[in-house]
Image: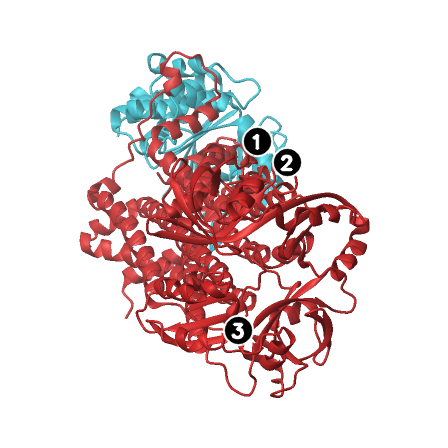
Chain colours: A cyan, B red
Amino acid sequence: MNAASVFTARGLTKSYRMGETTVHALRGVDLDIDPGEFIVLLGPSGSGKSTLLNILGGLDTPSSGAVHFLEHDLGHADEAELTRYRREHVGFVFQFYNLIAALTARENVALVTDIVPAGMPPAEALAWVGLAERLDHFPSQLSGGEQQRVAIARAIAKKPQVLLCDEPTGALDYETGKLVLEVIARINAELGTTAVVITHNAAIAGMADRVLKLGDGRIVAAEKPPRKLAPSEIRW
Amino acid sequence: MVSALDRKLLRDLWSLKTQVLSIALVIASGIAGFIGCFSTYESLRWSRENYYDSARFAHVFAYAKRAPQSLAARIGELPGVAEAETRVVRDAQLSLPGVTPPMIARLIGLDFARPAGMNRLTLTRGRWPAPGAAHEVLVNQRFVEARGLRLGERLQVLINGKLESLAFVGAVLTPEYIYPTRGGALPDDEWFAIVWMDSQALAAAFNMEGAFNSVLLRLQHGASPERTAEALDGLLAAYGGLGAAGRADQASDRILTQEINQQRVFGTVLPAVFLFVAAFILNVVLHRQVNAQRAEIAALKALGYDDRWIAVHYLKFASVIVLLGVVLGIAFGHWFGTAMTRLYTNLFHFPDFHFFMPAWVVLGGAALAVAAAFGGALAALGGVVRLKPAEALRPPAPAEFRPLLVERLGVPQLLTPSQRMVMRSLERKPLRALVTVAGILASVAILIAGTFWADGLEWFIDVQFNKVQRANVTIAFAEPVPADVARELGRLPGVLQVEATRAIPVRLRVGTRTYRTALSGVADDARLGRILDAKLVETRPVPGGVLLTRRLARRLDVSPGGRVQVDLLEGRRVKAELVVAGTADEMVGMNAWMRLEDLNRLARDGDVVSAASLLVDRADEPALLARLKESPAAANVIVMRSLLKTFRDTSAYNILFFTTVLSLFAATIAAGVVYNNARIQLGERAWELASLRVLGFTRGEVSLLLLGELALEIAAAIPLGFLAGYWLSALILVFMEQEVFQFPLILFRSTYLYAGVMIAAAGVLSALIVRNRIDRLDLVAVLKTRE
């Protein structure tokens, strides 16, 4: 085990029954992720990337194998421990933002900072994503990109060690998508937050420190791009 | 072949089975209450009419002192009379071994050789007395049961000063004494026996040979009982006639009719309210259920199903639920009605048990349920079918929210974001919150309206037996006696206080309206027998006027200051016109009062009394009652406590059964409302809640968010429900207003508490079930799917 790693996984498998058949979503994954790394997970549907992200995020547990976040054993944690892990260490960004419609941007962020010991002030988190002017707007008053940036502010406001993003640009147009990617890249760079991003979009891979390609439940390739690109440099 | 859409229907129903069942139970409760009560009322009415017909119950009843048998032929010739029968009826002291308080036997002469033309008896045990056997008697079933009489047992009866030993050979039912009472509104099974004996022997014992003192008439079809009774009065006046009366004024029928009518109110107002509440809830729930499936509806439209198909699909969905509810409701209603009818059949001692559910009751209940369900489903569909299919494919626009009203008014941030979520969600859809509150409120109200009877009954018993009638023993004299006699009662063992009263049978008349009752004389210093209303306000007769129960005044259409014609039906049969000095709101009876002094002056009888109320030391009661037994003047001794017991054992038991079942139905409705609300809210917010779980909210925190709204709604609905329950109860009593008995609108705190706790419990139970679902929210799906 690499002592410096944020995540370590060994022999990770995940299978579940789906009606009559057993689906082997992960078939033995070994993985180490260093602090501050920007990881992009690529792969076709059913390759296991979401399952891996879910296990890293404490939403699911592996069928076998070991997975640790720092000293936390995620493989054997119970529901309450996983909830606490998510609450204290993980920031999530969803494809569909998942904001609370009844709360303003500021309140959506406060919803999370209220339940962690040392979050940043919501206004500061929103300033970070460039929404200092839209603190008191409700989701219905914001564009899709703005909503996703609120979601990112909500994710980082608790100062998580890791930021897990599942298709963060999937529901956004090109320009807005890039804006969101910039924010994620900036957080990774300036706050040193480890980021794991799932995407279908191979172009985004250029932003990563390391690109993991999954296929059929295994990591089939791990690539280090020769140069980490800025979001402004990528096109798709 | 089952179409794919129908398969979807079946699977939807299966996946929503708990909700489907709870909605079906709501509708079943409404229908069961409706069908059960209405059928009971119809069945009892049928049973009474059937019994009256088959037993050939008389239409007109009259009593006189002593009329010659020769008068019988003239009575038979009165216009409208189909059949006349004369007989001798006398009350006598009755003793049984081991029973200290005096009992009364009403001796009725019967020729056992010849079947009676009217008021035919039904033998339930033993045999008929042998014709001419002077010492063999029949006794009414209710007394036999109350006293556990065994066939062959001997009754000691004081007949004209001579103690006779009569053998009990058979128990019978009679339409004339379905409710045996010595005059009060309460049944008197244990202390009042109806005894049929050989008519010759009875006449001989009371020197009534060739004479009669009781007349029964059956009338020709369409003849007026009032007019015939008046004509009969004319014939009997010279022989000490006490005034003839139709069935409506016959003591037993009057109470029986009141009991059955009470069932009608129970059977109409309360279940109708139930059914409407259930219908309302069904409507709301289906509305939301359809709304919850809007995405699927859009998808169906995208696939090419037209609006009609979709409407039919959801109507089928509603039909299955409503059908399940109706079937369950009819089954419960049948059980409830059968149990109630059996209870009353036993109470009334109808010879046959007969229960039926009139088709219109069943169809009416079912039709209302179907209308409510379809109305709800169609109203919801109206909004949903307008949805463009493409909307289902587009990312969701977040629901629009605004800051709370209090926030807009500039009140500083009082609430945490979670609390604000709850409050804004409430404020955003106030109508929905209102509907939820209304549903819960209605449940609270019907719980109260279903239970408050027990309070009223307790209150009635307390007021009537502890406040109005503080005497524990009352004595009615066979004939008016000098006031001194009553005073002498004070020297008997254990008597702490005596109060003499006088009651004279009267006919009151205002214009064309008449009413037969007793005019009571009340001493100015009366303490034992007072005139109190439900709120314990006392009224006293004032000099020179007559005081009427408010119900009696209304019946006669007279108000204070008006005049009433009073015909005394006893003694000198004085007729006079009196001023109505006031009205009193007594809970029971149709009474008229005057000052004792004024009454005696009116009757021109001097200082006499006809009854006495005694306050007796409980320890000396047996000794006193033994002494009273020997006193021939004391014709009728009533121990109040024993009356109370009988009353509690019968009416109270029935009401308790009724209210228990009703409140179970009400609780089911309440639980249905709360549970469905929670489930629908969960359905609407599952995605949001799961997102929060992913963000690190615990199950408890997330549950609080969801259930907080429901808790607020319940908290608002309960006190409002208390108010609604009070008014609903008042409304029921308005419909229920009866001649003889005004049920008091009294609600104890415990009833409110009970209703509140039941609803809160329904809330907690629903919350627990829903909480279980929150715990199983699919967190992974949230990342991939949108709302």
- The residue identified by callout 2 is B525
Q: Is residue B626 visible?
A: yes
> Which residue is at the front of the view, B226 or B73?
B73
Q: Nearer the viewer, mark 2 or mark 3?
A: 3
Which image quarter is the C terminus of chain B in?
top left
- The residue identified by callout 3 is B212
Both marks 3 and 1 on one chain: no
Q: Given the image, on which type of amino acid does mark 1 rest?
A: Tyr
Rendered residue at 55%/22% (across/down)? A116
Both marks 2 and 1 on one chain: no
Q: Given the image, on which type of amino acid does mark 2 rest?
A: Asp
Q: CA distance from mark 3 to mark 1?
A: 100 Å
Q: Is residue B304 visible?
A: no
- The subunit letter for the residue under badge 3 reads B
> Which residue is at the front of the view, B730 or B416?
B730
- The residue identified by callout 1 is A85
> Which residue is at the front of the view, B421 or B21?
B21
Rendered residue at 28%/32% (across/down)? B397
Residue B531 sits in which quadrant?
A: top right
Query: Is residue B449 depicted above or below B112 in this figure?
Result: above
Q: CA distance from mark 2 to mark 1?
A: 84 Å
Q: Given the image, on which type of amino acid does mark 3 rest?
A: Phe
Which image quarter is the N terminus of chain B in?
bottom left
Position of B317 with respect to B97 (left or right) is: left
- The subunit letter for the residue under badge 1 reads A
| Residue B731 locus on image (x, y percent) | 41, 43
